[in-house]
Image (cartoon, rainbow, N blue to C red):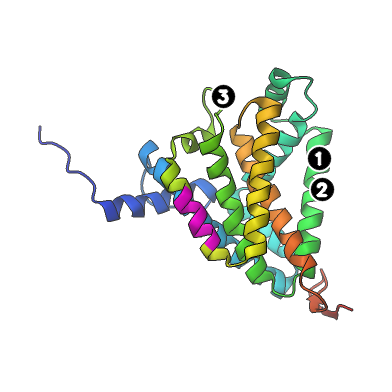
């Protein structure tokens, strides 16, 4: 039997990019991706996040935040929102084991419901307030997608299996490259610093709470990180013309 031909480096990276799109969105991507593709994919997470953010920022500017948030949820399959809800519900656990048990339960609890309401409200208000929602959402989308990669490299994965387990095998070198790509796509020193602080705070919190990370924690870090960065961007815009949620322009004073 002839030996399989090794995949060239450019093709490996192309497959990794496809795996990143497939992992983070519901966009159909041709091909079947294996563990090696997913291990390499994390470096391209910020690029995918920047694309999602740019689209949603344009929709927010043209049609208002509700349309943008709806499209984002459909585009990502509400994956990060579900992760946020499960992680928030886990905060009600008595201890580490109980928290992990709650997070595995697919039912929505009161903590999760409140977290979703607050998160979507803050995101919508921030998008409405940003003078340049496209730039703000692109920056937030890129930087937030680098957060779970860094968390997965620095903290142990506390479940035997799960969606986020593939990120645990990411090499530190690719995590650094991913973070550098995110910073380059953002180009905003304040946002980059805020993302770094958020990553460090998240690592310390989840290490103390459950001893590491899960897929839900990694997904929630994307959602919370993006929201935090959008809120930060909205506070630095100053007086600007913004759009109401009905889509009409209003003068902010």
Q: Nearer the viewer, mark 2 or mark 3?
A: 3
Say if mark 2 contacts mark 1, CB within 8 Å: yes
Label 1: how many Cα within 10 Å (few below 14, some 14–19, many 20+): some
Residue wearing tag 1: 113
Q: Residue at x 80, y 56 (%)?
A: 122
Helix, strand or loop at mark 3: loop
Judged left or right of residue 155, residue 87 is right
Q: Which of marks 2 and 3 is nearer the N terminus?
A: 2
Nearest the viewer among 9 and 31 is 9
Say if mark 2 contacts mark 3, CB within 8 Å: no
Label 2: how many Cα within 10 Å (few below 14, some 14–19, many 20+): few
What span is colored magenta in the figure? 176-183
Q: Which residue is drawn at 77% across and 69% down?
A: 236
| Residue 105 in view in this figure | no
Label 3: how many Cα within 10 Å (few below 14, some 14–19, many 20+): few
Residue 179's spot in the image, x, y percent? Answer: 52, 53
The numbered dot on residue 159 is 3
Helix, strand or loop at mark 1: helix
Q: Which of marks 1 and 3 is in front?
A: 3
Nearest the viewer among 247 and 187 is 187
Q: Quadrant of the N terminus?
A: top left
Helix, strand or loop at mark 2: helix
Is residue 170 located in the magenta-colored stretch of the structure? Answer: no
Residue 218's spot in the image, x, y percent? Answer: 60, 40
Cα distance between the residues tagged 2 and 1: 6 Å
Judged left or right of residue 89, residue 145 is left
Cα distance between the residues tagged 2 and 3: 28 Å
Residue wearing tag 2: 117
């Amino acid at each position: 039997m002839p030996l399989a031909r090794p995949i060239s480096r450019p093709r490996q990276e192309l497959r990794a990019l496809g795996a990143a799109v497939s992992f983070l969105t519901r966009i159909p991507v041709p091909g079947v991706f294996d563990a090696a593709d997913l291990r390499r994919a994390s470096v391209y997470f910020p690029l995918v996040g920047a694309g999602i953010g740019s689209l949603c920022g344009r929709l927010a500017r043209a049609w208002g935040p509700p349309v943008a948030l709806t499209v984002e949820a459909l585009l990502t399959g509400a994956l990060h929102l579900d992760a946020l809800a499960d992680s928030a519900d886990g905060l009600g656990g008595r201890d580490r084991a109980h928290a992990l048990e709650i997070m595995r339960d697919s039912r929505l609890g009161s903590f999760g419901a409140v977290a979703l309401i607050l998160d979507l409200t803050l995101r919508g208000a921030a998008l409405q307030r940003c003078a340049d929602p496209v730039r703000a959402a692109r920056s937030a989308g890129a930087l937030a997608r680098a957060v779970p990669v860094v968390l997965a490299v620095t903290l142990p994965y506390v479940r035997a299996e799960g969606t986020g387990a593939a990120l645990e095998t990411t090499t530190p070198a690719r995590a650094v490259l991913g973070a550098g790509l995110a910073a380059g796509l953002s180009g905003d020193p304040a946002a980059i610093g805020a993302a770094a602080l958020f990553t460090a705070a998240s690592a310390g919190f989840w290490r103390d709470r459950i001893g590491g990370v899960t897929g839900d924690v990694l997904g929630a870090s994307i959602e919370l990180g993006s929201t935090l960065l959008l809120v930060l961007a909205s506070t630095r815009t100053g007086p600007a013309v913004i759009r109401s949620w009905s889509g009409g322009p209003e003068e902010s004073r």
